[in-house]
């Protein structure tokens, strides 16, 4: 567990709260408020004068399709053979170890909608994935069973 103490929390729908605690378990927020009972083994971070925001979502990106530092050999974003490529899946070309994923995480981007390149009239199928992980199967945003 991780406890973020005394931060300024910016929410998407409920405004901003000062000197608030955020308790996380397995990368999920489980409680927000004045947390006085600290669970055993909890890592505590003093967030006084720091801002806590939800993870950002990049709705249009080619992240992982243009491998940084590999040049033309790492370009899996566009299919230049045909102008119409609705059958191309971005997921098949994503390189999960691309350093661009670390950059995204560092700047607060936690989820991305990766799409094939923009040079085709019809470019193919996008994929929504998390920016952390080493295997694409672990990164893809899968439908959860809500039962």
Image (cartoon, rainbow, N blue to C red):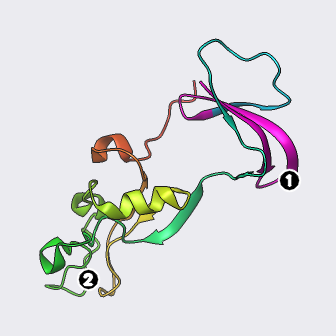
Does the magenta portion include 14?
A: yes
Task: Return the residue at label 1.
Answer: 16
In the displayed structure, does residue 52 sit left or right of residue 105?
right
Q: Position of residue 112 (x, y in %)?
A: 47, 60
Mark 1 burial class by Cα count in 10 Å: few <14, some 14-19, many 20+: some
Q: How far apart are marks 1 and 2 (CA)?
A: 46 Å
Q: Where is residue 13 in the image (x, y as percent from the top left)?
A: 81, 54
**Residue in the picture at 55% in, 35% down:** 27
Report the predominant secondary structure element of the magenta stretch.
strand
- The mark nearer the N terminus, 1 or 2, is 1
Q: Position of residue 9 (x, y in %)?
A: 78, 48
Q: In which quarter of the image is the N terminus?
A: top right
**Residue in the picture at 40% in, 47% down:** 132
Q: Quadrant of the C terminus?
A: top right
Query: Does the CB distance between marks 1 and 2 fall below 8 Å?
Result: no
Q: Give the range drawn in magenta.
A: 1-28
Mark 1 lies on a secondary structure that is strand
Task: Return the residue at label 2.
Answer: 84
| Residue 57 higher or lower than 117, as above or below | above
**Residue in the picture at 72% in, 43% down:** 47
How many callouts does the rendering have? 2
| Residue 31 higher or lower than 79, as above or below | above
In the displayed structure, does residue 21 sit left or right of residue 61?
right
Using the image as rendered, state which of residue 75 and residue 8 is in the foreground: 8
């Amino acid at each position: 567990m991780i406890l973020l103490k005394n931060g300024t929390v910016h929410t998407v729908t409920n405004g901003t709260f000062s000197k608030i605690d955020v308790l996380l378990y397995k990368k999920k927020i489980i409680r927000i408020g004045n947390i006085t009972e600290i669970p055993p083994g909890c890592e505590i971070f003093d967030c006084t004068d720091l801002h806590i925001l939800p993870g950002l979502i990049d709705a249009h990106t080619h992240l992982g399709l243009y491998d940084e530092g590999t040049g033309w050999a790492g370009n899996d974003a566009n299919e230049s053979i045909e102008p119409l490529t609705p059958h191309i899946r971005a997921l098949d070309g994503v390189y999960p170890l691309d350093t661009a994923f670390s950059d995204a995480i560092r700047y607060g981007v936690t989820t991305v909608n990766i799409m094939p390149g923009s040079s085709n009239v019809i470019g193919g199928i996008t994929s929504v994935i998390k920016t952390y992980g080493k295997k694409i199967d672990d990164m893809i945003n899968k439908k959860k069973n809500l039962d």
